[in-house]
Image: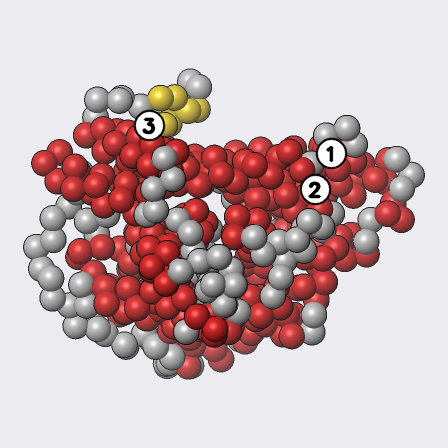
Amino acid sequence: MDKFFKISERGSSISTEVVGGLTTFLAMAYIIAVNPAILGAAGVPFNAALTATCFGAAIMTIAMGLFANRPIALASGMGINAVVAFALCLGVGVDWRVAMAVIFVEGIVILILVLCGLREAIMNAIPDALRRSIAIGIGLFIAFIGLKGGGLIIADEETFLTMGSLTSPTAIVAIVSILLAVILTAVKLKGALIISIITATIVGIPLGVTAMPTDLSFAPDFSSFGAPFQMTSEGTMAIVQLVLQPALLMFVFSLLMSDFFDTVGTVVAVGSQADFVDKKGNVEDVKEILIVDSAAAAVGGLAGASSITSYIESVSGVAAGARTGLSNIVVGLAFILFAFLAPVVGMVSFAATCGALVVVGYLMMSEIKEIDWSDIALAFPAFITIIGIPLTYSITNGIGLGFISYCIIKTAQGKAKDVKPLMWVAAAAFLATFIFA
């Protein structure tokens, strides 16, 4: 095991990988409850969606561990599942199986791009400063998500955002989570983040924040598997109906853009923390990582779980010490287990994971010192990427704004030739997406 996963070689241990895997799982476990709830609005049976969510995440996370040997966990992507439910099914009015066919086709297309080397080539065409800014922006995004989920930041009609009530039960649990995560990380205690999550979950029980399970039994329902090839209510195979509605291909392109660059950001961010990004910003084993991630999108559509993608919450496991694919095996097994014990996962509230996400955000800010802030052609696109990700609540939007501004500034300086061709292609694709999608 040590030789296969290169555990000692990467300065880790089996116990550390287990703790890292559990930390990642707890940080992303909310998807087990959230994804079925969102897909349920599209007409996907709850138990079927829950089974697809758990087994889809387990299969692809384990595949990433075995094939790429990197601590990047995967599950149904937030955002894309909302597109499936509210834009495709409720908006356009297509059957949920047709929506899954859209996801399936998008995954196949993006996998072909990886096998042709295009996705990796685009990653390598991104300037180092922009790659680092993506990681920083995601760090702020993660911290913001944690604070928002913990009720410490709330919406305000006049100021858009403001501080929430620090005496609310949710905020109290979040504060406990943050204090424990920060203090235990500061004293370099192994398992600091997982301890903060579990303790905060326990503290939330008497406060009414932690929902106690009422039923620990759950029988898996695999009826959504093969959704693109199932018959719709109109008596047509879902994937055939997709072909008969060319307008849906715009959704394929839009989702492809989102999937493509969300993963770029996630891989760079996780790699920066897990030490598999070199000094030039190049990601080691990137092809293997991208192959699994791309195949995961297609598997998500095939299983009826929406697009499965790399999870930025993996950084929390990395912060807990995970460095190899062994942590992925732990995450995958946990997903399989909780397919039968889903209500237990529902006990872990957003507030309980707040501390882990805030600490991860802090750790990811370290990349900021590597950017040359004296060169506006690199510094401004980096800046707009950093603020664009959290302020637009989208990794893809932030990356797109950075790419476009980089090309514009280089052109204004008379240095358009410095921009690699694939950066022009990516910037143009982003511009088209912003305008038409």
**Whole-Å distance between the Cαs marked 2 and 3?**
31 Å
Residue 186 appears left or right of 203: right
List the residue tagged with mark 2.
129
Q: Is residue 226 above or below residue 333?
A: below
Tell me the tag on residue 372: 1
Residue at position x 66%, y 53% from top? 278
Return the x and y of residue 241 as percentages of the image width and height.
47, 76
Using the rendered view, name the quadrant where residue 371 is placed.
Answer: top right
The three-letter code of the residue at mark 3 reads Leu
**Whole-Å distance between the Cαs marked 1 and 2?**
7 Å
- The reply to whether dot 1 and dot 2 touch (C-beta < 8 Å) is yes
Give 167 or 248, whichever is nearer the viewer. Answer: 167
Let me know if residue 215 appears in the view: yes
The three-letter code of the residue at mark 2 reads Ala
Return the x and y of residue 407 as percentages of the image width and height.
78, 43
Judge the density around disc 1: few (<14), some (14-19), many (≥20) Cα neighbours within 10 Å: few
Using the rendered view, name the quadrant where residue 225 is placed.
Answer: bottom left
**Colouring convention used in this rendered image of the protein:** secondary structure
The three-letter code of the residue at mark 1 reads Asp
Sooner in the amino-acid sequence: mark 2 or mark 3: 2
List the residue tagged with mark 3.
152
> Residue farthest to the right?
414
Tell me the tag on residue 248: none
Which element is circle 3 on? loop
Which element is circle 1 on? loop
